[in-house]
Image (spheres, helix red, strand yellow):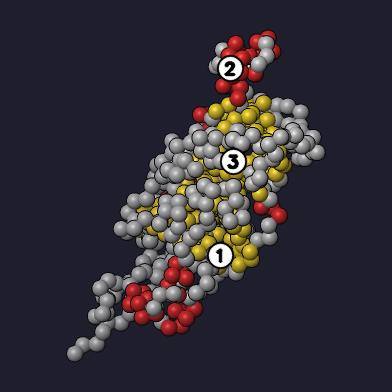
Amino acid sequence: MSSAPAPPVVSSSSPGPVVNGSSSLPQSSEPSSTVISAPAASETVPYASDDPNYPLWGITESDPEYEAIRGSLGATVLGPQNEYINMQNPDLLAPPTTDAGDVSNAKWPFGLSHNRLQTGGWARQQNVEVMPFATSMAGVNMRLEAGAIRELHWHKTAEWAYMINGSVQLTSVNSDGQNFLDTVNTGDLWYFPPGIPHSIQATDDSPAGAEFLLVFDDGSFSEDDTFLLTDWLAHVPKEVIAKNFQTNMSAFDHIPGEQLYIFPSSPPPSDAQAPEDPQGQIPNPFTFKLSQVQPTQLSGGSVKIVDSSTFTVATAIAAAEVTVEPGAIRCWHPTQDEWSYFLYGEGRITIFAASGNARTFNYEPGDIGFVPASFGHYVENTSNTTLRYLEIFNSDRFQDVSLNQWLALTPPALVKAHLNLDDETIDHLSKTKPIVVGPA
């Protein structure tokens, strides 16, 4: 009787991380390929390759060669190249050998969005028109100079927001006639349910004003379709407006003839109070001081989680602010639809879409990512600086399923039958959910 075949022969060389530079990416080229022997009698397929699949260059690497080559695969590019695009997307031009099949584009830089410039600020958006993959959520990046106002308005969708820089004063009134006024600062949140009218005004706490991120629970949302106070009144006969407010038509001689959207004004006073309200003030605040929450420290970074269990009014959107240290990863997990926004550092995500389909995308500050529900994925820090980003879910609760915990809580024999892991590896699996883990 012949003996079982030997295990596959794998390459012993593995490129190390960049030590002096902004990226923990390999400087050397990868080995050409792994020699795979026949499977053992109890196996049905060959072993997975041990070839490394690091990104082949970083965005600040000096004079890299942007070529469509990985190991023995691919060839040089002979035609014209957009080197800025290639620099930012090494895993598209020279993808990991683990990528296969087809996955829709899961990256959109706000820098490619059309910018709507106004006196006092600007706004740019991402929705299904530019990123068809992201069907359940859309985003807007907005900037207001000190004192500038995003005029009184409302939406058909929920609005969740994160303050990127500066501070803004918010006002609102709900359907019970209760009013609300509060100021949020860098790193804080707000949330307005659908149909709740509100306004946003930059304070002068920072001379430059404010910038923030808005997320809506509908991928088809368009900021240009917002219901605006001035737009509404400009399209109602003035005698009807006067009748509604029980006053003379001349009182409205100077209302704007078209929408204002964003416009300059004097900064609000720091001690501003909501007008006295016989109905009282809104009982569940529309703001959340995430900047004051202490992050949960993890082996490879940190996380702040906020959902309706702590921010009770936010019933349609949950989120986490995540940091991932160099060499660490946000653990592999399938979950709900996940809309991501990258604040600092560089990272990459491989999305597994079932049926052998997988694709890897690279992200920088200002980029948006999207992963549909149940698609397995991870977030890896590919730089030598801390990666910080937002995970945002179209849900009232933050939920995910950890691949590590899943296997740790599955009978060991069953895991061995699938993956041929040894006892030591299985014992090392985590029965409590790891969120961010450092290098092994």
Crowd tier of the residue under label 2, counting other residues whose Cα lies within 10 Å: few below 14, some 14–19, many 20 or above: some
- Looking at the rendered image, the quarter that the N terminus falls into is bottom left
Outermost residue toward the bottom in this view: 1
Residue 189 shown left or right of residue 47 in the figure: right
From the image, tell me which residue sits under label 1.
Answer: 436
Q: What's the residue type where badge 1 is placed?
A: Val
From the image, tell me which residue sits under label 2.
Answer: 234
Q: As rendered, which of 173 and 278 lies closer to the eye?
A: 278
Q: As rendered, which of 240 and 35 lies closer to the eye?
A: 240
Disc 3 from disc 1: Cα separation: 30 Å
Report helix, strand or loop for mark 2. loop
x, y percent for residue 140? 56, 38
Q: Is residue 439 visible?
A: yes
**Going from the N terminus, do you reach mark 2 or mark 3 first?**
3
Q: Are marks 2 and 3 in contact (CB under 8 Å)?
A: no
Q: Are marks 2 and 1 in contact (CB under 8 Å)?
A: no
From the image, tell me which residue sits under label 3.
Answer: 192
x, y percent for residue 334? 43, 59
Q: What's the residue type where badge 2 is placed?
A: Ala
Disc 2 from disc 1: Cα separation: 52 Å
**Going from the N terminus, do you reach mark 3 or mark 1 first?**
3
Disc 2 from disc 3: Cα separation: 25 Å
Q: Residue at x 66, y 41 (%)?
A: 282
Q: Residue at x 38, y 61 (%)?
A: 98
